[in-house]
Amino acid sequence: MYWGIALFLGVVTAVEVAVPYIEALDPVRVPLLIVLAIIKFGTVVAFFMHLRYDKKLYRTLFLFGVIGVIPLFVVVLLTMHAF
Amino acid sequence: MTSPAVETHEHHDIRPIRKAAMWVFLGSECMFFGSMIATFLLYRNNTADGPGAEIFDIPFTSASSFVLLMSSLTMVLAHNAFEKRDARGTRIWLLATALLGTTFLAGQIYEFTEFVHKGLTLSTSSFGSSFYMLTGFHGAHVAIGVLMLLAMFYLSLDGRLYEDRGLNVELVGLYWHFVDIVWIVIFTVVYLLQV
Amino acid sequence: MVLDSSKDLAPAEPTGIWSWITTVDHKRIGLLYGVTALIAFFVAGLEALLLRLQLTTANGTVLSADAYNQLFTMHGLTMLLVVVMPVGAAFMNYFIPLHIGARDVAFPRANAFSYWLFLFSTIMLLSSFVLGGAPDGGWFGYAPLSTQLDEFVRMDYYAIGAQLLGIASIMASANFIATVFTMRAPGMNLMRIPVFTWMAVVVSFLLIFSLPIFGVGLFQMFFDRNFGTQFFGGGGDPLLWQHLFWLFGHPEVYVLILPAMGIVSEVIPVFSRKPLFGYPFVVFSGIAIGFMGFGVWAHHMYTAGLGPVAEAGFGVATMMIAVPTGVKIFNWIGTMWGGKVRFELPMMFAIGFVSLFVIGGLSGVLHSVVPSDYQQHDSYFVVAHFHYVLFGGGVFGYVAGAYYWFPKWTGRFLDQRLGQWHFWLMLLGFNLTFAPMHILGLNGMARRTYRYPEGLGWEFWNQVATVGSFIIGISFLIFAWNLIKSRKHGVAAGSDPWDGRTLEWSIPSPPPVHNFDEIPHVEHVDDFWHRKYATDEEGRAVRMPDVTGGTIAPETTTGGESEGGGHEDDMHMPSPSYYPIVAAFGIIITGYGFVYLPGGWVAVGVGALVTLWGFFGWSLEPVTRDEHHD
């Protein structure tokens, strides 16, 4: 199973690297790359780190950090006019 | 078998406790890297007329990203072998992971050297400062991970891997995968989105 | 007899200096935290008295501007990071395991490491006074003031010292979270945990998620100062530091106050002989404060010009966070209402906490209104506000905890008469010192300036404040004398002197090394109370006959059978270890090296090697060594 997941991750990475070179994808480049990164992130966490099968407590503890950090810094960057 | 001394706290198998603490720590690390990624995003265009994202060598970084990604595979195989009490498998995959990690680090050193030659240093611009800080702290995490992997490898040589200790293959594994997923984010946000 | 045989087999309490250096016992570490923090409190208090002396008259001449800057910076830093936080950690260390019915925290050696790193960082920060100058950029360390290089090491001490204190706190917090979530006694579900321990969990989460952000900011400050990076200067934006700092700094405020709220939530029910009114509300409002505490940081930055949308948003969020805080106030009042209130010393301090915290909380709500805050920003009104919250709130709460739990630590009461003097002098001195600052602030007196001209009408209230501050000083000298005297000569207290409600009162005072002879089986909130009292038809508490003096016969403790592996021969306490102190020592050598770059690289290298030795020895040594098995 682990080999299959690794293969999947490798393919996604290949797609990621290809995206900037395909001009047709330019309008959706940013969201597409973010989605691909989230897929890879989630796959490693769920399967390699066994979070999918492990205690719910671990998931809660980790998700506080992963989910929490995003709104905080979106607000920081917005108030600093970074976008 | 797990020695009875594991029952330091009766009723409590120590392993889930350690894992809970490791997950909390990783949650904390998300904030750490999140702050640095936000700093990079803030300064991504502050290049002070020095080099910017155009000096990134995407094919090279893709290759080293792939190396780190595959080290997650070897790590999970090491953990798997560890759980199955396959000492030889554990040893081999631990060493493979450490080697892949070292390869990644070597790639990063090469990359930094190249960038410095192209005129991007820590003090060139806010862009340079935040780029080197983010990737540098990530590299430091990889280096610490390699040290821990080598310690595990050393313990596995004479079968001491299964005694109750502060550090074990599972925890090192969680740490290692975390370092990998941070790089997944960095690769996308710092490299792919900026070129 | 189960009780006696288990006592024979239980590990004996070791003695001597070496046993304290290598200790991994959460109770001893808790006491070490407490004593260290108290000493630091006197240092930081002394700094405050010097500041007050300088401000007594217009154009004060006691301190130079430079000395004043160092002293007010160190007063803030020390009080927040080295006094109030560690006092909280002292109570948490001592009582989390006792509250949840555990033998120790999850990682005893990591716990020891946290303490030693905290102690060494404290020494390092204080040593800066004689080693090139103390930090002088304010505890908030705003850039570009903090990144200017007119001085060589001062703000490096800040950057490194605060960083190391942060690492110690992160480890301690991960430890507490793991302890509470995985090591509770059978039956102790989440809604039966004492409120103090709940607040400790919230605080741990706040620290775990806010300190790394501060850590990044400190690294950036350090790099800007030493490696020529441009995070806050050059092409960088000093506003970034403010964000990173207050993303930590505001949750930090709740880190300081929540444990005190927890203590008060323990004290008030015991001395009102009633259960805490609305236990779930108190718990959930604590959690709500934790979450919302992350969403209000920018109210410290209104005058930085964030724009109307951000300011309005943060203003509303700040007003909202007053709601769960208010809920708690009403719960405490509701607990006292109709109760049989005993005005013992812990209760007096707890009531002092509630009253003064309300004043501080209300002036806080004033600050949430943006135009009003524009007026008050950087004035003494703000100083008055946060001292009412942190001193009137925090310190009163922690002192209440000290009077409440001193019998548990030592088996003796603190002296009543001295305690009364302490309370009334502290109450008087506190209000004399900080109430006038409201007036001074509204009259325009600015914070952080070392002198003010004549003729502005500020002299009188400044003199009052100075007199008040010395009264506070006297009250704490009385407290210190009381602690020293009562430790050996106080009135003997027994194991349950206050007719307590929580598990720590079910074991002897001071508690044995292994805490509980039998791990208790918990069936209620305030479980110990329910073992002592049944309820008659009219709902009154009736004492059950088989319980004497708070010591429970083992049959009642576990209903005659032990859960899981609670057998006496399993009682392996973790072995003492010197690796934690080695690792902490190595880190401090590294820290000093970083302060004195570039020459310090040598110390950085040496320190790193010592640290590695400590960590590897630690992670590779077995938790319980064989020779310690009985």
Image: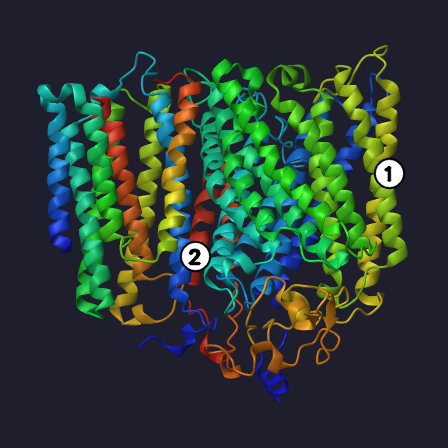
Label 2 is placed on what type of residue? Phe
Give the SS element for disc 1.
Answer: helix
x and y percentages locating residue C612 in the rendered image? 42, 54
State left or right for residue C296 relative to residue C277.
Answer: left
Say which of B54 and C554 sits in front: C554
Q: Residue at x 78, y 25 (%)?
A: C437
Q: Is residue C307 visible?
A: no
Marks 1, 2: nearer the viewer: 1
Give the farthest residue toward the bottom: C1
- Label 2 resides on the chain identified as C
Q: Quadrant of residue C340?
A: bottom right
Q: What numbered label is drawn on residue C428?
A: 1
Q: Is residue B130 visible?
A: yes
x and y percentages locating residue C262 in the rendered image? 64, 50
**In the rendered image, the vertical position of residue C237 relative to residue C417, given as above or below:** above
Q: Which residue is mark 2?
A: C615
**In the rendered image, the vertical position of residue C162 relative to residue B98, given as above or below:** above
- Please state, as top left, top right, bottom left or bottom right, where the C terminus of chain B lies in the image: top left
Label 1 is placed on what type of residue? Leu
State left or right for residue C454 relative to residue C175.
Answer: right
Tags 1 and 2 both on a single chain: yes
Q: Residue at x 32, y 39 (%)?
A: B138
